[in-house]
Amino acid sequence: MTPILPPDWQGRERDATPPDLYRQRRAFLKTAGLGAIGLAAAPFGCGSDRAAAVRAARPTGPLATIPETAPRDGLPAPRNPAYTVEGRGLTERELTATYNNFYEFDGSSKEVWPLTGLYEPFPWTLRVSGLVEQPLTFDLTNLIRQMPLEERVYRHRCVEAWSMVVPWSGFPLKALIDRCRPLSSAQYVRFVSADRPREMPGIPGQPWYEWPYYEALRMDEATNELAFVATGLYGEPLPKQNGSPLHVILPWKYGYKGPKAVVALEFVRERPNTFWNDLQPQEYGFLSNVNPNIPHPRWTQATERPLGYDRKIPTLLFNGYGEWVAGLYPDEPTTPQPPTAR
Ligand SMILES: Nc1nc2c(c(=O)[nH]1)N[C@H]1C(S)=C(S)[C@@H](COP(=O)(O)O)O[C@H]1N2
Ligand SMILES: [Mo]
């Protein structure tokens, strides 16, 4: 079934992130060298050579992007019965693999899978720094082999008002954080995604974004039992476009709060900046809990379109996960509000 997109959620890329705006903003950025990343690191000399290399490496299909080098230990993982979704079927697997937001490959189209051919996620190192007993690095393949993998069926709600229901496999984020041994002074955990301009054509191709992608959570959010590290989808390793080799999943928040292809965790005292909040603070807040009462400045958040359907369904407060997380947010509006960023 081909998704039919109403105009309101064709939104963010085209309307909210005009390249000129970013170029202007970046002209003011004093973060030395950042603005030159795209050019300095572009390996192919010129844009058309790069595009040709990416085209030549095109995967044969949207599921041919599951890395051959990904560990398959523990897959398919046993489903955790505490996390199932009543009343909605699973989204078709092909749809989850062909309709993606992964701006490191391209932010102007959902069809990013054909651009992932040069991306080789394994081997993968996860660096841990900041307010921890001692800085660490994990080899992700070893980590996956040591973690008891489970499958969880979660709702996913993108801020653009499309949604899906999918079985992720992986391990609780808390299990990873416990291994990082953060100090009690850590109030937030910051995530940084991969910065691989040779493999990710959207990085040199869209220099107006502040690569690498960066996100952050309060510690009480990050250690909530819902917060999950997905390394698999539909019983197999994650396809590249879904965030291989690991994708943080926070089902009560808009999708962009969960970074893909994370290479670093940093434990800090002060609230860190985040990628979308820095770009559009009036549209994308730090908390970004799914909330039908708070319209996006340019569209309603009261409804959503499940991938594969051309109709809308109501969006639930905390995406239906209030039982787990409502206590974390005493100030979350529960009645309709004027448009604002949260
Ligand atoms: N590094 C990185 N992480 C990211 C994004 C991105 O562009 N880059 N997009 C986010 C958004 S907006 C969504 S909706 C989900 C999409 O995940 P999926 O492609 O597996 O559905 O990933 C999130 N994590
Ligand atoms: Mo999203």
Image: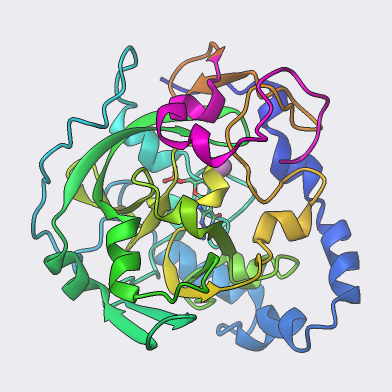
Which corner quadrant holds the N terminus? top left
In the figure, is residue 172 to the left or right of 212? left
Q: Looking at the image, is 316 positioned above or below residue 146?
A: above
| Image position, residue 14 (x, y; %) | 75, 42
**Number of marks in picture:** 0
Stretch of the chain drawn in magenta: 314-342
Q: Quadrant of residue 205?
A: bottom right
Res 64 visible: no
Res 34 visible: yes
Q: Is residue 328 rendered magenta in the image?
A: yes
232 and 103: which is toward the camera: 232
| Image position, residue 243 (x, y; %) | 40, 56
Which corner quadrant holds the C terminus? top right
| Image position, residue 83 (x, y; %) | 27, 32
| Image position, residue 282 (x, y; %) | 82, 45
Chosen colour scheme: rainbow
66 and 225: which is toward the camera: 225
Q: Looking at the image, is 85 positioned above or below residue 329?
A: above
Q: Residue at x 28, y 47 (%)?
A: 63
